Amino acid sequence: MAEERRPKQCTVVLPTESMKAMAESIGVGQLQEESCAALSEEVSYRIKEIAQDALKFMHHGKRRKLTTSDIDHALKLKNVEPLYGFQSQEFIPFRFASGGGRELHFYEEKEVDLSDIINTPLPRVPLDVSLKAPKEQQKAESTEPLKVVKPGQEEEGSIQKGQGAISAEAKGKKEGLMRMKPRSTHELSVEQQLYYKEITEACVGSCEAKRAEALQSIATDPGLYQMLPRFSTFISEGVRVNVVQNNLALLIYLMRMVKALMDNPTLYLEKYLHELIPAVVTCIVSKQLCLRPDVDNHWALRDFAARLMAQSCKTFSTTTNNIQSRITKTFTKSWLDEKTQWTTRYGCIAGLSELGPDVIKTLILPRLTVEGARIKAVSEGPVVSNIDKIGADHVQSLLLKHCASVIAKTRPLPDNMEQYRADYGYLGPTLCSHVVKARAQAALQAQQVNRTTLTITQPRPTLTVSQSGIGGSGGSRSPSIIKVPSSLTLMSTRPGTPTQPSPPATKYIVMATSAGASSTQQVLDGSLVITLSSSSGSSVTSTVASATSTLQPLVKLESRAASGLGGSRPLQKYIVVSLPTSASSSLESKSGMLPPSSSSTSPISLEAGMKMDHTGCVPNGTLLPI
Amino acid sequence: MAAVQDGQLNMEVEKDIKTEITNDGSGNINANSSSPGSTSSGGKSKSPAGSGEDQQTLLAVLQFLKRNKLTESVDILRREAGLSADADDSPVSDSAGAGSGGVPNVSADGGDANSLLSRVSIATPFAPPATAPPKVVAASGGEDQPDVNVVLSAYSQQGDPVLYPLYYNGLKKFIESVLDCHRAELSQVFYPLFVHMYLELVYNNHENEAKQFFEKFSGDQECYYEEDLRILSSMSKKEHMKGNETMLDFRTSKFVLRISRDSYQLLKRHLQERQNNQIWNIIQEHLYIDIFDGMPRSKSQIDAMSGSLAGEGKRDANKAKVFYGLLKEPEIEVPLDDEDEEAENEEGKPKKKKPKKDSMGSKSKKQDPNAPQQTRIPLPELKDSDKLDKIMNMKEATKKIRLGPDNLPSICFYSFLNAYQGLTAVDFTDDSSLIAGGFADSTVRVWSVTPKKLRRVKSAADLSNIDKESDDVLERIMDEKTASESKILYGHSGPVYGISFSPDRNYLLSSSEDGTVRLWSLQTFTCLVGYKGHNYPVWDTQFSPYGYYFISGGHDRVARLWATDHYQPLRMFAGHLADITCTLFHPNSNYVATGSADRTIRLWDVLTGNCVRILTGHKGPIHSLAFSPNGKFMASGATDGRVLLWDVGHGLMVGELKGHTDTIYALKFSRDGEILASGSMDNTVKLWDTLKAFDDVELDDFTAATGHIHLPENSQELLLGTYMTKSTPVIHLHFTRRNLLLAAGAYNP
């Protein structure tokens, strides 16, 4: 490689035209061609010589960049008058001109009005050089004998082994520099700043209606890319702070923000995954996420975050960033660790299970025996803390839920209880019964699929739940927050929304209405309206498993064009009225077919602001969290 | 300019050579105060000289005889002088400047150490003004030009330019066809031969042939010569050769090759058979072939040692005895209380041996056989404050952490904020209480890193009001109003490239692009002396570990040894072929190591001024040096990102530490020498297990005698840790007395 370059270096000389141009510039016309050639060689040689000397100064200045002062010093070394006052704001100060068959680069000399310079306000005085040392040093200077600290273990101040950063120092430097050198490249306009402020406040504020609107805006607004770095920092910082404070609610809000960001098709999250993924993973595996782990349902957050994680793996994992395998490794590693707490264990398993049946098959099934023994030790063992017991219970149901469906698909019949015990240990028998149920469910589903299939191939599914108010009057947007007593699940294959495996049977009748008829649509009082905007090339199956029979949920499926621009398209509406749930399906939903997030203990109440749509171009409804 | 001078070439040659000689002579007088040799030689040589060239030849031979006592070389010279008048050996006539090999500018008879200091002060009146920089480069125009012509005239021998590639190719074919064991050795010939043939072509105005020759064969050269080839490639005209340093380096010094006798015989036979006089002449004239008996060396062995501008060091250049042992520590009792101290001071002089011993006193009672005489060079006597400091040092040493592979040091990083790449040099005091930084904006800044603020001494008027009898007079003379954490020292007029604290923390040295070395007082924070001698940028300066002396080296290729109270250098160490980039005192202060852009390290004897070691092996300019605390080993780091370890006593390379990807600007051994820390431009600090590195080396008599090293291939095993900064090149490292590693650099946003 180097060899190839060398001959080139040997021959590079300035073009003779440059010599002519320079000669003309000092008043020498008609320079002989030979003189030009001779001059250009001589000049090229001298320039190279000076450049080589200048390099020396660069090396001794301990820099990687050659500066004009290096060249000045090199000239001084050769007893040549340096170029005084050369400085340029731009990288290459030359202008290009051509004409008459000649091409020319020249240095533009502008006329400067002195009064302008005098009147412009002075720039800020640059900060003086200062010395920054980590706090550790104070210890070193005191008289107490130094403790030996291994590089990996130092809390602060010393260089972290292999971490690629001097933690405290780097932080300190950042602060110092941020103060004095604000980045000007990514300035937000005042409107954007206001928007950002509103959105973030709404997202973590107490008003659920506002939050729903804000999330909807994040998920749909096409012009958010400028704010994306801010959002991702907001989320990652927010998670960092709230994990420490065990503020479960805020963590949930932040995860919903992540989901909304992922739902927005105009945003490219790839560049911000380094901030988002740690935040999400934190919410999955953190030891403690809430103040009272025995009471609060942090399991739902873990599940939700795990689904987010699985989704981003599916969407963003490439051969170069290898997100999926890295994430898998992380989960597996902490799962395999004996000392891992039940909460983290749960998170790891949830995270792995969401990654799909293949992962379950290869990573989770082989561990079932070990895990079963562990659960057994907790649940049947003598002295055990309540928290551990709850954790073990959750892990057990999680394992059963995910493994049963996979086993049902892969394991040949018959389902022998003893055989299961032999294969999967403590969990075997329970697992067996679950598998049997799963098989029955699958069979039932197959039947129902034959009967009623809801396949909507429309762009952008966003699920919005709106509670119809008392009247259907157009502008009334009373943000009444209604706790939806029903558990509700949504299944979508479109990437961007966390999916839920094995939906229960579909129980809907779908009625399509024309766009014009939307205003005439009657909505039953007190009934639940679900608006579905479906996305391109994907099928949406949505289910509502109604636990309370008094309510007749209505699912409204609304199709829109790919982006918010599609206002011109006539709105198509589907009214889905749920069938009375059969006895078997409601039983199933209670017996764990539904994810814990939608179980009745979920702290995430399904709240929705009421919103009625009258015109097709306004995206209606509010966003449903799960 | 050049054209005009060509016209009156002969005249000027003669004239300038005369001036050169007188300069040279007086220079010698200055240094030895009693060396009539060189002046008289000048006189003698002039008389029989008919033409300018004859005169040069004779002069050269005579000077060489006198100076070097290298009978071998002299024989060759004589033979050549007989053969052709053109073949005069110009390196000799040039020796006043760049010098050849280890030619000392200071004669070796100045061994009487006690009189050294006084003698220099006597000698100073005779010293020439600082206008005679021993620099060969034609930077100041006329004066150096004839010198260059002399050098170049050696190339005037004409051969058919068309045949050059054939000759070269013929040799290439031959070397490729010889036995494997000889091939690696003989391949060493390629590079110098290539360069000299190319230069001959260029000199004789065969520009196109030269270019073709270059293109054809430059690819064959070893990759580590790429830098030089680049410079070479830009030279395509005879005029360019004047004033080009690299070119002169090739001419003024013989390229040294080490070849086994068998391989050499092969080559010789081949060339004589083929009547290949062109190549044979070049080998005779421009190469120094160091023939040894024994097994030819392997390719890796050769590669480890080669890479320097002028080939390997000659074997006999590294034969001189080096007293690498440490001086005996003065006996100081650690006082139980302060009253004891007064009594100890009477006996605590460095020369005296004292049977009484403290547990943490000096390590051995016996004199180290490898240590120099305590009085070999005069060292300043210890002051009370020095003793106090030594006591502090010992106390600290008891709290020192024993480092090792399992017990790595903590690293504390001092970052310079808002320095905007302007930080060019850093130094810590030995007790780690002060940090000094040299900056590209010509300033020197000193920080106190302890709660103790920096204070200036009061002005003279205020000082007269102080009660001199009071106990706390030292406290009273300080001006409390000036207390601050940092002080700025203004005085230089160019970037400050080197900086060094005196061991007693009273002075600070700084060297700058403006060609001066300045001594600053840390009591008054003013400049005390500006040492002018280098007329070109001074890249580095360093205080002796005992204070008083300091060394400086710079672009003029001469390292100078100074004493703080003399404005003229005591010694001038000439021999490097390119800029001296870093300087370092041996822990016993009797030797000085200099690293250079010619990719060699030289070790100089402070007493005699002789070059006692030439260490080759780096493939890029050397930017950092470190001696192990026991003085036995040395580490060096270069732009090639490698750290090499050297056995100073044997003059051998004993290790190669690969891992850095950019220039290594900082090296430091831990206080006990178990760990070497290296800091680099690539934003990392790496720690190396030196104990293991030095243990692994098996030094039998054979390797010691021939210099054939077998480097262990395990530098990765020696790497104990890599510590990255975010974006801060590491430009200085320092182990505190308790073995905490301090690093410094400027944050580079």
Image: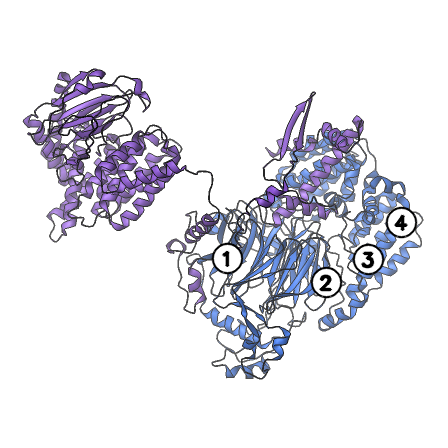
Residue under pointer 2: B571
Amino acid type, mark 4 = Glu
Please tell me which of labels 3 and 2 falls first in the chain. Answer: 3
**Residue shown at the point (68%, 69%) measured from the top left:** B377
| B294 relative to B426, above or below | above
Circles 4 and 1 on the same chain: no
Cα separation between marks 3 and 1: 48 Å
| Label ID, residue A131 | 1
Residues at discs 4 and 2 in contact (Cβ within 8 Å): no
Residue under pointer 4: B14
Please tell me which of labels 4 and 2 falls first in the chain. Answer: 4
| A159 relative to B180, above or below | below
Q: Which chain is purple?
A: A
Figure colour of chain B: blue
Please tell me which of labels 3 and 4 falls first in the chain. Answer: 4
Cα separation between marks 3 and 4: 15 Å
Residues at discs 3 and 4 in contact (Cβ within 8 Å): no
Residue under pointer 3: B24
